[in-house]
Image (spheres, rainbow, N blue to C red):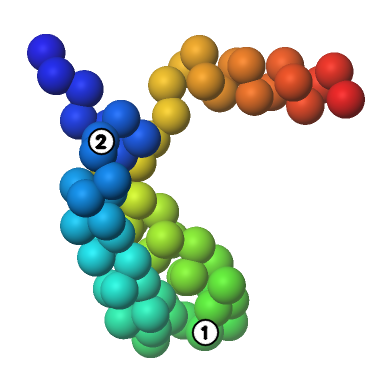
Amino acid sequence: MTDDRYQNQPWYIRLWRRRFYLTIPYYAVKIWLTTSWDEMPFKHCWGLAVGDAQLMMEWYYTDDEVRSYLDDRRKK
């Protein structure tokens, strides 16, 4: 099984996958307009659009990476 994570790819593949960041403003506005403006502020819509772009880029962290990050934060 190959590891297709964004973090493990060469620079040119990472650059190509960053094209999904271009869709963030469009999707953020689309989410904001299709929901009630009182229910969800625009910054939450932006965060959802960023998360969706990172999901399409296959940018995610393993459990070990998250645990080590949290342990480092806890030690500080």
Q: Residue at x 54, y 78 (%)?
A: 42
Q: Which residue is mark 1?
A: 37
Please say whether residue 57 is visible from this viewpoint.
no
Q: Where is residue 61 drawn, in percent x and y? A: 43, 29
Q: Where is residue 71 drawn, in percent x and y? A: 72, 16
Residues packed near mark 1 inside 10 Å, few (<14), some (14 to 19) or many (20 plus): few
Q: What amino acid type is highlighted by mark number 1?
A: Trp
Measured Cα–Cα span from mark 2 to mark 1: 39 Å
Seen in the image, is 34 located left or right of residue 10?
right
Seen in the image, is 54 located left or right of residue 64?
left
Count the marks.
Answer: 2
Q: Secondary structure at mark 2?
A: loop
Seen in the image, is 68 located left or right of residue 51?
right
Q: Quadrant of the N terminus?
A: top left
Q: Residue at x 35, y 41 (%)?
A: 59
**As displayed, is residue 42 above or below residue 68?**
below
Q: Nearer the viewer, mark 2 or mark 1?
A: 2
What is the residue that sits farthest to the right in this orientation? 76
Would you identify the image quadrant in which residue 50 lies?
bottom left
Q: Residue at x 25, y 39 (%)?
A: 10
Q: Nearer the viewer, residue 13 or 70?
A: 13
First reached walking from the N terminus: tag 2 or tag 1: 2
Q: Secondary structure at mark 1?
A: loop
Would you identify the image quadrant in which residue 7 lies?
top left
Residues packed near mark 2 inside 10 Å, few (<14), some (14 to 19) or many (20 plus): few
Q: Nearer the viewer, residue 12 or 64?
A: 12
Q: Which mark is residue 9?
A: 2
Q: Residue at x 74, y 21 (%)?
A: 72
